[in-house]
């Protein structure tokens, strides 16, 4: 039975959420002594999640969990998409200087590109994956919403301050952690993955 998973991520925001989402599952989440710099050269969320999990598995030899996720904005041709974490540095749409944090530079770039754009619909997408060398499992989750005109809220991470989930008047960064987990792309994907893992037992 699988009772431990190594977490393949460099994101503190993800670590917090993933640990929370695994609580009560009977699976302990381990953090690597040293995080790896994995080049995310895949063309899809699934491919990038696989590249990250495989890199950690090859070093540590422990069944590994990876999450590849992002914000998809149809009015921006699907960007930031798989480039969400480094959107500020992409030449597509013009580079955005990092004045405070990378998250804030990403947010500024999205708001700049969305100026005057009427269709503000967007969704968060996550692909979560477990890889253990001779087997692997993955699941996906999506959370629909829209891009606000300015950032609001202190919670969460990444683009949360400018993402308002469908049916809510608050941004994702204004929701309580357990409220975010209930509706988030990551929460949905992870709960599905846990069901798949249960079938393995
Ligand atoms: P690892 O690859 O090391 O896990 P990363 O931050 O580079 O960390 P990704 O390549 O999967 O991870 O990029 C995910 C980006 O998408 C993340 O940096 C945020 O900008 C955004 N994102 C993903 N999930 C999010 C969430 O729940 N809330 C806000 N932004 C999110």
Image (tube, helix red, strand yellow):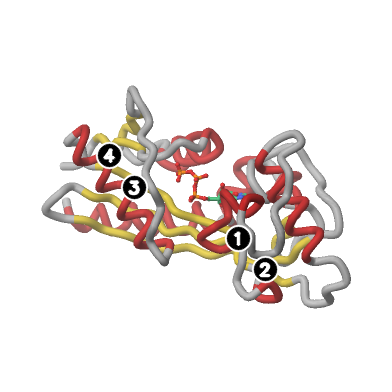
Q: CA distance from mark 2 to mark 4?
A: 31 Å
Residue 130 horizontal/vertical position (percent): 28, 50
Instruction: Say few, some or many: other residues with alpha carbon within 10 Å of mark 3 (under 14 / 14 to 19 / 20 or more).
Output: many
Q: CA distance from mark 1 to mark 3?
A: 19 Å
Residue carrying label 2? 122
Looking at the picture, tell me which residue is in the foreground, 66 or 166.
66
Upstream in the sequence, badge 1 or badge 3?
3
Upstream in the sequence, badge 2 or badge 4?
4
- Taking 89 as reference, is 78 above or below it? below
Q: Is residue 196 left or right of residue 157?
A: left
Residue carrying label 3? 52
What is the quadrant of the N terminus in the image?
A: top left
Do callouts 2 and 1 mark residues in contact (Cβ within 8 Å)? Answer: yes
Upstream in the sequence, badge 2 or badge 1?
1
Residue carrying label 1? 71
Q: CA distance from mark 3 to mark 4?
A: 6 Å
At 28% from the left edge and 38% from the top edge, which residue is drawn?
5
Residue carrying label 4? 56
- Taking 76 as reference, is 175 above or below it? above
Q: Is residue 47 left or right of residue 57?
A: right
Whether disc 3's CB lies below 8 Å from ligand 1 is answered: yes
Looking at the picture, tell me which residue is in the foreground, 87 or 44.
87
Helix, strand or loop at label 4? It is: helix
């Amino acid at each position: 039975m699988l009772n431990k998973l190594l977490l393949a991520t460099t994101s503190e925001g993800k670590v917090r959420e993933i640990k929370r989402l695994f609580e009560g599952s009977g699976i302990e989440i381990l953090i690597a002594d040293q995080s790896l710099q994995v080049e995310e050269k895949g063309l899809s969320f699934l491919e990038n999640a696989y590249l990250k999990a495989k890199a950690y598995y090859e070093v540590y030899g422990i069944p590994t969990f990876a999450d590849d996720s992002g914000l998809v904005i149809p009015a921006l041709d699907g960007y930031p998409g798989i480039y969400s974490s480094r959107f500020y540095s992409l030449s597509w749409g013009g580079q955005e200087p990092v004045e405070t944090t990378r998250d804030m530079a990403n947010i500024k770039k999205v708001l700049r590109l969305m100026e005057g754009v009427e269709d503000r619909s967007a969704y968060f997408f996550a692909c979560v994956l477990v890889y253990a060398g001779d087997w692997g499992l993955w699941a996906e989750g999506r959370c629909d919403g829209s891009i606000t005109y300015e950032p609001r809220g202190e919670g969460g991470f990444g683009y949360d301050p400018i993402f308002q989930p469908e049916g809510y008047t608050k941004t994702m960064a204004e929701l309580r952690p357990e409220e975010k987990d209930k509706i988030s792309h990551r929460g949905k994907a992870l709960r599905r993955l846990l069901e798949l893992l249960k079938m393995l037992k």
